Image: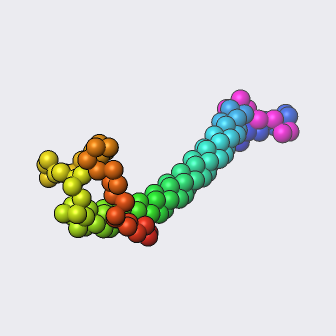
Amino acid sequence: MAQGSDGNHPGYRSPVSRQSSSDDAKKVMRREKNRVAAQKSRMRQTQKADSLHLESENLEKENLALRKEVKQLTEEAKYLSSLLSSHEPLCPGLTPTSPELSYQPPSNQHHTTYHQHMAVPHYQH
């Protein structure tokens, strides 16, 4: 007698056959769930990579802009330092006490027209 059939009942399957059929269906369902989960995982991974790529590009642009600003401010600082150096001998209100000059507002007794003789052009970026 063949497994999965009974001569007395056509279409009858033995309990062993029913069990393996049920197991096969469970395997198919498990594989399908796994396939869907793997697909979702790959999609999330791709989205994360895309997001990191965009963030990297934005940070590079910001870095470039900040470097440009640092360069402009460095040039402005050099210009202002040279302007101050050329003005120092002309202005008795400036008395350097250290390598770094500090601003000290004038007293009204000594220098009433403080810095009025100095024409300062506006630094252009």
Which image quarter holds the C terminus? bottom left
**In the image, residue 55 lies at what x, y percent?**
50, 55
The residue shown at (65%, 42%) is: 33
42 relative position to 18: left or right: left
The residue shown at (54%, 54%) is: 51
79 relative position to 97: left or right: right
**In the image, residue 29 lies at what x, y percent?**
68, 41
Viewer-closest of 42 and 61: 61
Provide the residue span drawn in magenta: 10-16
Q: Tell me, yes or no, if residue 4 can be seen here.
A: yes
The residue shown at (58%, 49%) is: 44
Inspect the magenta stretch and tell me whether residue 118 lies in it.
no
**In the image, residue 81 lies at what x, y percent?**
26, 63
The residue shown at (71%, 29%) is: 15
Work out whether 7 lies above or below 101: above
11 relative position to 42: left or right: right
Q: Quadrant of residue 22?
A: top right
Inspect the magenta stretch and tell me whether residue 15 lies in it.
yes
Work out whether 107 lies above or below 42: above
Q: Quadrant of residue 91?
A: bottom left
Q: Main secondary structure of the magenta part?
A: loop
Viewer-closest of 46 and 62: 62
Viewer-closest of 12 and 58: 58
10 relative position to 33: left or right: right
Which image quarter holds the N terminus? top right
Q: Which residue extends farthest front?
A: 109
The colour scheme applied to this rendered structure is: rainbow
